[in-house]
Image (tube, rainbow, N blue to C red):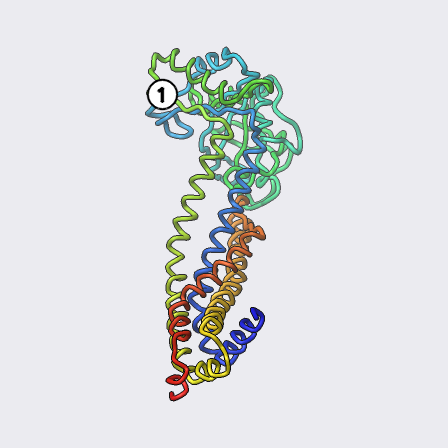
């Protein structure tokens, strides 16, 4: 019996192709928007999670609150003294300081702005190499290195910035100081990161004139210690050292898991906000289905009368019209899914190949596709419920007279 409902509904839609297509426009625009946004949101979430997995769950990041990135002007600051305080906390395996700033780099007679980060040349630098700064060509910094540089993957594999690719042994200038390229970083995933470079920490302090100020401290926790507990202990020790009460911290201590959760929450809120706006087109599409089905009931009044005269019940008529409106919604949903997937993959392709942003990706798990199809069928059925009830309640004698 259910197969008959679908067959009759499908046949009726084929007889009114143009009207069916026009009715589906609102549905597939709404579904396409929703699918593309969720697909991009899920893809970005997966990419961000992958980046934090590279950092590792045993890492803690300490930054000042209120300072300007890379300058530490205004607000609070981190100092070398804070690094000593952190290293005294029980459960810390090692802690690595970092400073960074936007600088002008000269190479091949071209000047370009990029980020330069100062990394330690001692064993503490391993904390940062494990946290995403993985060297895939050349070498890491050695103790005593002064004017050496490790370049981002994009600088080594693209001639976009300086007219040609940089390689090991090339010399570039920062503030009239000559740096020799000794290593190349693995691809991080964003154009600014992959276009940046690393220099020894002491050299960076000298160039940036930061003194004892630091921009960030990376901490690695002992594998047998609870990362969250160690993070709380760091907060407590730094508060005591700065004579601050709980809640008055002018610094931030976050585990990689906390950062990952924060990014996921922000991304989810933004995605669902945009989906809420896109749902307006689904409402418009539902209204379109309702109008179409009311028109269909008026046009097929005599047909409904004949169906009832030969034994069709009110429920049969109701289910036929509900199935028909549901198929309208599902057909629009299927087209919308195809368009949405195409749009999201196109955006990801453009971001990756033209903008150099690798973390914008499209991901559409099977449950998203099936859920969108089911949702569009339900939307269609709900939109057609009132016309279907009207058709089911028609008196067969009166319907045959029309």
45, above or below 309, in the image: above
Q: In this rendered view, identify the residue nearer to me: 87 or 156.
A: 87
Report the side of 156 relative to 114 (left or right). Answer: right
Quadrant, the C terminus:
bottom left
Image quarter of residue 125:
top right
Image quarter of residue 122:
top right
User: Residue at horizontal 35%, vertical 18%?
Assistant: 246
Image quarter of residue 102:
top left
Q: Which residue is mark 1?
A: 249
Q: Residue 121 at what x, y percent from top left?
A: 58, 20
User: Residue at horizontal 50%, vertical 83%?
Assistant: 310
115, above or below 371, in the image: above
| Secondary structure of the residue carrying numbered label 1 | loop
Q: In this rendered view, identify the residue nearer to me: 212 or 203.
A: 212
Quadrant, the N terminus:
bottom right
Q: Residue 195 at what x, y percent from top left?
A: 53, 39
């Amino acid at each position: 019996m259910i197969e008959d409902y679908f067959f009759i509904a499908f046949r009726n839609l084929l007889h009114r192709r143009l009207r069916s297509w026009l009715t589906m426009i609102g549905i597939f625009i709404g579904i396409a928007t929703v699918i593309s946004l969720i697909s991009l949101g899920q893809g970005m979430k997966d990419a961000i999670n992958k980046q934090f997995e590279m950092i590792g769950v045993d890492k803690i990041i300490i930054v000042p609150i209120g300072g300007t990135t890379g300058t530490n002007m205004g607000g609070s600051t981190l100092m070398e003294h804070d690094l000593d305080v952190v290293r005294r906390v029980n459960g810390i395996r090692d802690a690595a300081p970092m400073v960074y700033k936007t600088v002008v780099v000269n190479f091949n007679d071209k000047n370009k702005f990029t980020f330069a980060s100062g990394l330690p040349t001692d064993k503490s630098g391993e904390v940062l190499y494990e946290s995403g700064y993985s060297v895939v060509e050349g070498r890491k910094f050695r103790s005593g290195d002064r004017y050496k540089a490790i370049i981002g993957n994009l600088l080594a594999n693209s001639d976009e910035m300086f007219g040609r690719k940089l390689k090991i042994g090339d010399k570039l200038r920062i503030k009239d100081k000559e740096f020799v390229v000794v290593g190349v970083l693995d691809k991080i995933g964003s154009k600014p990161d992959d276009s940046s470079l690393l220099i020894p920490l002491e050299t960076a302090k000298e160039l940036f004139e930061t003194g004892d100020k630091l921009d960030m401290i990376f901490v690695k926790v002992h594998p047998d210690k609870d990362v969250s507990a160690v993070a709380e202990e760091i907060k407590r020790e730094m508060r005591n050292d700065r004579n601050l009460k709980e809640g008055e911290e002018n610094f931030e201590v976050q585990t990689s898991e906390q950062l990952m959760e924060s990014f996921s929450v922000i991304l989810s809120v933004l995605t669902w906000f945009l989906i809420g706006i896109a749902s307006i087109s689904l409402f418009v599409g539902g209204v379109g289905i309702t109008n179409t089905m009311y028109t269909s009931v008026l046009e097929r009044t005599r047909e409904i009368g004949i169906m009832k005269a030969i034994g069709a019940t009110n429920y049969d008529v109701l289910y036929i019209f509900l199935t028909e409106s549901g198929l309208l919604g599902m057909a629009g949903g299927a087209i919308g899914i195809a368009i949405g997937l195409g749009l999201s993959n196109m955006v990801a392709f453009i971001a990756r190949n033209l903008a150099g942003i690798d973390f914008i990706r499209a991901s559409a798990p099977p449950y998203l596709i099936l859920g969108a199809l089911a949702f569009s069928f339900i939307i269609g059925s709900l939109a057609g419920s009132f016309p279907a009830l009207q058709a089911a309640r028609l008196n067969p004698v009166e319907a045959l007279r029309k």
